[in-house]
Amino acid sequence: MKGRVFWRGRSSSSGEVRRGDSVRPAYASLICTMSSMQWDFPLELCCRPMAFVALTGLDVTYNAIHRAIWDAFCANRRADRVPISFKVLPGDHEYPKCRQKRTSYEWYIPKGILKTGWLNKHLNLVPALVVVFYELDWDEGQWKEKQSECATRVEIVRQSLQGRNTKVAVVLIQKKTPLPPGEDLIASERAAALCNACDLSGKSLFVLPHTDHLVGYIIRLENAFYEHAQTYYYTEIRRVKSHKEFLNKTTHQLLFVRHQFKTAFFSELKQDTQNALKNYRTAYNLVHELRAHETNMLEIKTMAGFINYKICRLCFQHNAPLDAIAQFRKHVDLCKKKIGSAELAFEHTAWMSKQFQAFGDLFDEAIKLGLTAIQTQNPGFYYQQAAYYAQERKQLANQLCNHDPSTTYPSPDPLETPSGVLDFFGQRPWRQSHQSIEPPDPEKEKVGILALQLKERDVDHSELIIALLSNAVAQFKKYKCPRMKSHLMVQMGEEYYYAKDYSKALKLLDYVMCDYRSERWWKLLTFILTTALKCAYLMGQIKDYITYSLELLGRSSTLNNEQKSRIEKNLIKVLMNESPAPEPDCDSKAIKTAQKLWTDRISLAGSNIFTIEMQDYVPFVECKACFLAPSFHVDVPVQLHVYLRADCPHPFRFSKLCVCFNNQEYNQHCVVEETYQTSDILEASSQGTMCLVPGKTRQYVFKFVARTEDVGKKVEITSVDLVLGSDTGRCVILNWRGGGGDAASCQEALQATRSFKRRPKLPDNEVCWDSVTLQASTMVISRVPRILLQLRHEPPALTNEMYCLTVTVQSQEATIARDVKLTAGLKPGQDANLTQTTHVTLDGTEMCDDSHPALLPDIPIGDLHPEEMVKKPLHIRCGQVGSRIFLVHVSYAVTTVVEGKEIICKCHKDETITIETVVPFDVTAKFVSTKFEHMDRVFADIPFLLMMDILSASPWSLTIANSRLELAHSMILVDEMESQLAQVILQTGESASECFCLQCPPAPTNQSGVASGQYIISWKRTSAAKSIPVVNTVITLPHVIVEAIPLYVHADLPSFGRVRESLPVKYWLQNRTKLVQDVEIFVEPNDAFMFSGLKQVRLRILPDTEQELLYNFYPLMAGYQQLPGLNISLSRFPAVSTQLLSRFLPTHVFVKPQGRQADEVIIVAA
């Protein structure tokens, strides 16, 4: 089967699709008239070249199927679809005629480099492929007739394309989905027959089923069309290259450039961008090899600009921005001196401006597609340079096109051509196709140059410059280059001024003035202010005019005194409600309009009061307000100084000075006002209160009494207002926020502090301006209390004791201190645990509990007469160790007189002390056996000892009133005893001990450790009064492990023995179990004793009974001797060792030597 059937595919889109009636006219963008668009690149040059495919046989208006096919071609094209430009054309459409092919170039002289219609012709007029759509199914009944009609349509298309290499293809629109190839024999036969009838190859016949999967079939068709288009452009490239062998470099230099450009452009259409870039580079080099002279200079530069644009675009497309920048710099270096005719020099600057603008556009487009730019290399620099050349164009146009107004435009128009378009890019309309050095008709040349100059005179250069500067500003703003942005905005403002759009000029200039003020560029600021003043005058903006005049008279202005005097006089005229004199160098027509505006302003009965915020400007009047101290007591007048200094050429009078505070009641105390005639504003006399002499600092002193309600609050200066003018004319309020200062004050103050320059000596009545420091706020604090507050105590405090802190308050006031109150206790804001464990009370006879607060507020003391003293004891209980800060606050009211005014002052005095709380004792509890051996566990029903060791940790002596033991239910006290430590006094570092004999019953089977109970010590300081309650310190005793023992063995023997005298010893063995115990006993002899009794015996002891054994030991040696050992074995409890059982028995006894009878008497007596 020769035809190709495309099955369902995935839909996607890309490229550009055009309808036949939706494309611009063929040469719409190529009309070369001397308008502002003359230097724009043709649209065909700037767009992305794509293969042009013409679709015929589709009735997209009346046939729904054809419309659906066309929509599938052109709708929702994504980036992954092939780049093809589609156009629907009628079947008999007339394509551009192909000229007869030249066989020799021997006598051919080219008339130009590139025709103006060539790009458009190959983009929109000459298709690479013509596709004939025809509705025909394989099972069509009238197959022969349909086949013949289809062949006729193909032949008509071929006749229209006669002489061109355009490919032709046929697409059969079918209603049914075809079978896979090879299965439909009829389709294969008829496809072959149709190819023969239409003279088509099998690769040029396609089938398009109109089914639900139409988009997938269309995408496959597009890919096939793209292959045919690739073949066509490859053929065209070879055709153009074949001409090269007929050319010579003597007469055909233009053709070398033309053919190289065409080869590159066809490569772009073929989407072979690498070869396209290579050929464009070659074409660019060939352009600059052409012999340039005045008549062809414009054509060479035009083509060089076109090719450079293509090279830079492809470099950015290949992600090689450095190559693009290098190419553009090379292009500028080669072309910037090719000016051409001196009378048309503005054309060269216009062309240069367009080159920079186009490259900036390319650079910006590449950034939007993902390229990363930096501060020092971004599109803004190219837009800025384009604006620079546009400004140069404007200057050259003003010089070269400054013809007499009576000069008329030439007739007939030398810039018109018979066809309305030029034949070749870059040629002059009056001498097209002329390539000689000299112009053919000097008179026509002269008339043509005049027409170009008159056309240039009508161009709005400011609009072009502003657009370029605006683009540059946007780029510099994007890449955070604030100074470049400000610089260009100034230029934009100037252009708006030249364009007579004064409102936009003023808006831009006002915006950038803030930056120049903050960075102290005074010369630049003066230049901008001068232009802004002109704009304000020409628009009749009174407030802006006054503002800029104030600043131009100030210290930041670099104008000379003569200019400042003129501005000062104009300012006075405005304040007197008169029209100011015109600003110099303004347009005469604009001045007349402005004078009318000012006259209207004078006649209008509107508000003549203007307020100007001085913080945003650098006016000729400086202001500093400062309180003399950062705080004032309420019984001392608040003192405020305001300093003013003027920098204008002549003394200046003001009408009013007022200071405003955050509490408006103080405003009335800080006002200076002086009445004078408006004409006396510039009076030279400096005797007036409100007259400021240039360079002299004027000081104004204010004083007022603060309100008692403002104690603890800040008094802040919200503003300082200096009124210029009067109610009869115009009134200007110079407003300084806070304590003064303007846009330059901060930097000046910083420089003054860093300067090593000596300050000049001034007379006593003058003040050095730099020595004055702003102090815009002060604090009103309470009157200095004249009261003595003493605290007496004995630190540190002991845990849980009633610690006594005695507060002594003594009045030292000259009058009665009324309503004296005392607040004492823990200072707020400390750790929450300290607050919860600290309690304060005035009653020291009872112990504090948790209901008492940590701070006692407003304890009334009453009135205190002069030198009267009151003592208040406070008792503090601290339940936790640690450091605490205690506050004692005394407040009272006293009557005093300030500046002849009686006020009631509330005074207070605070004292804080830090008290450390420590534990009174270090108590240690330990369990020992009756032999005072340490025990880590006890045995049930066997007595043991509890030893309590108490070490005093207090720096003060402590008296122990009592001590007692509160045992748990699991403990039994063997002997009832009174406290052994009652009324014992312990000094620092001393210790006392107490011993208790205890017994523990058997513990439950599943519980090994049992609680012991508590040990309570009742104590207080030895120095404390009797009324102070004792403190009970509770020590929780440790748990003890209780174990049961099956056999309890204990002995009874004298406290000492004597050598060679009998020593009777009894042993008792008690069975503690419910079982009969078989006990085997063996006595181990030693060298210190002989003994009588059973050396080895076996016993059987019944449950809960005991057995007695009696031995007589006979000591042989004196001293502390070891008794014979008693080894006991239990057959029922083999795990119970002899060592465990024998720990209850004495191991040693003291044996005395034999002595005299007197010694015995003494011993018996003892």
Image (tube, rainbow, N blue to C red):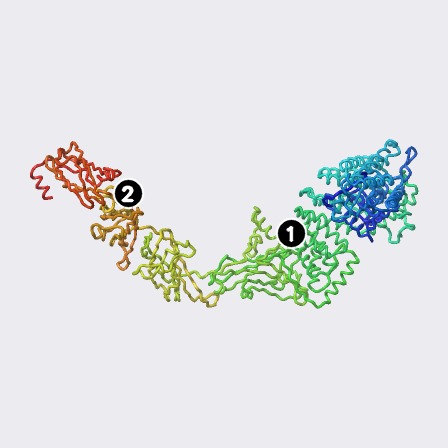
Distance CA(mark 1)–CA(mark 2): 87 Å
Query: Label 2 belongs to which residue?
Result: 936
Crowd tier of the residue under label 2, counting other residues whose Cα lies within 10 Å: few below 14, some 14–19, many 20 or above: few
Q: Is residue 739 left or right of residue 429?
A: left
Q: Which quadrant: the C terminus? A: top left
Q: Answer with the quarter of the image where residue 130 lies.
A: top right
Would you place residue 1137 above or below residue 404 in this image? above
- Answer left or right for 34 relative to 1009: right
Labelled disc at residue 1134: none
Q: Quadrant of residue 538?
A: bottom right
Dot 1 amino acid type? Arg
- Residue 716 shows in the view: yes
Provide residue 49's location: percent of width, then percent of height: 79, 42
Tell me the amino acid under the disc marked 2.
Answer: Asp
Answer with left or right where residue 610 lies relative to residue 1095: right
* Residue 171 placement (x, y as % from top left): 81, 44
Location of residue 128 in the rendering, given as x and y in whole percent from the top left corner? 83, 41
Identify the residue position indicated by label 1 in the image. Answer: 517
Instruction: Let me know if residue 958 appears in the view.
Output: no
